[in-house]
Image (cartoon, rainbow, N blue to C red):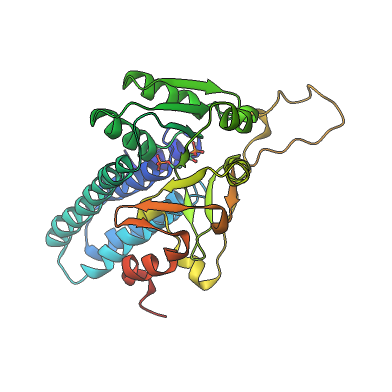
Amino acid sequence: MTADKTAKDIRNMRIRGALDIAIAAARAMRKELDGKSTAAVISNLKKSGKTLKAARPTAVSLPNAVDYVLYLAEKNKKLDAGEFTRTTSKDIQKFIDDQERALERIAEIGANLIDSNDTILTHCNSDTVVALFERARKEGKKFKVICTETRPRFQGHLTARALAKAKIPTTLVVDSAARLMMKEFKVDKVIVGGDTVLANGDLINKIGTSQIAVAARDLDIDFIAAVESIKFSPRSIEGEMAKIEYRDTKEVIKPGKIRGIKVLNPAFDITPAEMIDMLITEEGIIPPQGAYHLLREKFGWELSSF
Ligand code: RUB
């Protein structure tokens, strides 16, 4: 798939979820490695990278993946065209494999946190969280999941379908039922995915996540996020904060259905670090306050200049 087509699919959410969009961007750039000269390919990669980065603004995994591919290309720029293509292609494939391994590792670590008889609430659709639940189920743990439908695009249905397939007892509720369910069903843990983690440990995830975190704090329930390190924002160290995506209001209500009002459709929100009990990363469990150190460790290629 070309970078333009991939960017289009990310924009219209045919490809979605922070990890998937990062992998799709890297794959699309890998397909653009052929060219007359190394310089021509790098220039084309830069152009494609710009288009891909602009496809969705919030998940930092997307610009991180693009920038890493451009870093690899820069590293190999002295090679002649054929060698450049072979080496960079291998490098990008290794990056993709690392992302897939990171998800598996998080699933493995996260499954250890699930106890038999747990009731866990999740929000939206995170492949990472679904993999973690599937892993715990395979290990023989018997637990229940409550998932929110996740208005306006109902990504919670994807979660519910995947969990039903894995034979995990699952209850689907409307988003606004989250707190009541947490109380009535004595939820043990909330586990969500994430789109971006800032250097101060704040988590950006699907709209509604922060309200769930507030309810979890109120009810003394652990609030956990499962996030690969590709979702940490190196640029937040320099003060670049999160961009919250506002999507088409058609996703919320038919245009003109209620006259004389304004409609807004923010797609993500920010859960402050102090509301988060732990982050599960492929490097292990860290407190959100450990985000800065993880960034320093994993993003040396990006942060070497300061
Ligand atoms: C998806 C969402 C997910 C994260 C993590 O939002 O908020 O929780 O992206 O997902 P959208 P994953 O549907 O708007 O992309 O673990 O799959 O990376």
> Residue visible at 71% across and 23% down?
254
Looking at the image, how many numbered discs can be counted on the residues? Answer: 0
Q: Give the percent coordinates (x, y) of residue 9.
A: 43, 36
Q: Quadrant of residue 75?
A: bottom left
Please identify the quarter of the rendering in which residue 100 is found: top left
Name the residue located 84 percent from the left edge and 33 percent from the top edge: 261
* The C terminus - image quarter: bottom left
Front residue of 232/43: it is 232
Indicate the position of residue 96 as horizontal and vertical percent values.
25, 49
Residue 18 appears left or right of 101: right
In this picture, is 134 found above or below 257? Answer: below
Residue furthest to the right: 260
Q: Residue at x 24, y 54 (%)?
A: 95
Left or right of 194 on screen, residue 166: left
Instruction: Give how far across and how far down residue 292 sits, in percent.
Output: 43, 68
Query: Which image quadrant: the N terminus?
Result: top left
Visible residue check, residue 57: no
Q: Looking at the image, which residue sits at the far bottom?
A: 306
Whole-percent x, y for residue 39 in the image: 27, 65
